[in-house]
Image: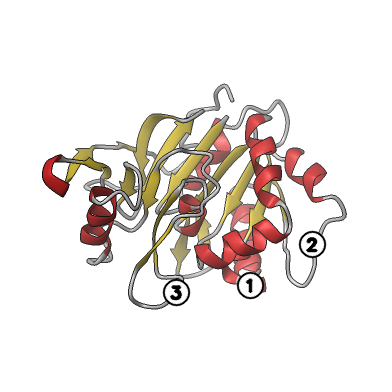
Amino acid sequence: MQILAASGGFQPDGRWGARVGPLLDHAIAVAATSGRPRLCLLQTALGDDQSAYARAYAALNRDRPEVVVSHLALFPMPSVADVRRHLLAQDVVWVGGGSVANLLAVWRVHGLGEILRAAWEAGVVLGGVSAGSLCWHVGGTTDSFGPDLRPVTNGLALLPYSNTPHYDSEAARRPLYQRLVADGTLPAGWATDDGVGLHFRGTELVEAVADRPDAYAWRVEPGPDGTAVETRVTPRVLSEARAGGGGGAR
C-alpha cells in the first residue's frame, strides 16, 4: 500500500516536450514487480486532454521503454471495458494535474474512489502531481474554482491528512493553507515545494524525496491560540535514473 503524492513527475523537455523525471521514476521503481512494470495514466483533471496523454506516452516510451503504458480516459466514456480489472492489473497509477474539483466529481460518477482504494489495498502504487497529489488526501487548497484559491474538502481520504502542492511557487497557498489548518477547515497535513514528493506506505510517511536540491516538504499542524505550526522536512534528493533504487515491498 504505497502512495507518492508529489509536486512534480514529468519534466519539461525543450526537444521532446516532456521527459520522465526522478519523482515518476521513483514511483515506478518502488512498485514490486517481477516483470515489466505496468503503468496507467489518468489525465481526468485536464478533461482527458489528448496532447497530455501523447506527451506522457512519448516520454515513457523513450525514457522507460520497459514500462507497459496504458491510460484510462473517462471522456466521453471509459476507454477500457472493465475499469476495475484494468486498474487492479497495474503496478502504478499516475494521475496528472489540473482541476482536482472536477477530477473528484468525475471519479465519483464512475465509482473510481472505491476502485482506487481497492487497487491501493491490493498493492498498486498510486501517485501523481498537483491534483494527482491532493486527491488521495482529505482535502487541501485548489484553484479549481478560479484564480483565488479555495479549500477542497472531499478528497478520497486514503490518507487522513490535508495536502497542498506548489507550496513555494504560489505565494497565496502558504498563508491560506496555514489558516485552514489552524481553524479546523482542514486536518493537519503536508505541503510540498515544487519538485518534492511524499512517499507513504500505508498511511505513514516513509520519506520525502525531491528531484532538486533546496526544495522541502512541510508538516503543518494546528498550534496554540488559533495558529498553525509549520515544520520543515528536508527530502532525499533523487538521482536522475532509477530513482527508487530497485523497488521495494508494497
Residue located farthest toward the bottom when viewing the structure as drawn: 146
Mark 1: secondary structure: loop
Numbered disc in front, either 3 or 1: 3
Numbered disc in front, either 3 or 2: 3
Give amino acid for label 3. Phe
How crowded pointer 1 is (Cα within 10 Å; few <14, some 14-19, many 20+) is rated as some
How crowded pointer 2 is (Cα within 10 Å; few <14, some 14-19, many 20+) is rated as few
Cα distance, mark 3 to mark 1? 19 Å
Mark 2: secondary structure: loop
Cα distance, mark 3 to mark 2? 25 Å
In the foreground, 86 or 35: 86
Q: Are marks 3 and 2 in contact (CB under 8 Å)?
A: no
Give amino acid for label 1. Asp
Numbered disc in front, either 2 or 1: 2
Q: Which residue is mark 3?
A: 145
Q: Which residue is mark 2?
A: 78
Residue located farthest toward the left when viewing the structure as drawn: 225
Q: Is residue 83 left or right of residue 81?
A: left
Q: Is residue 54 left or right of residue 21?
A: right
Give amino acid for label 2. Pro
Q: Which residue is mark 1?
A: 49
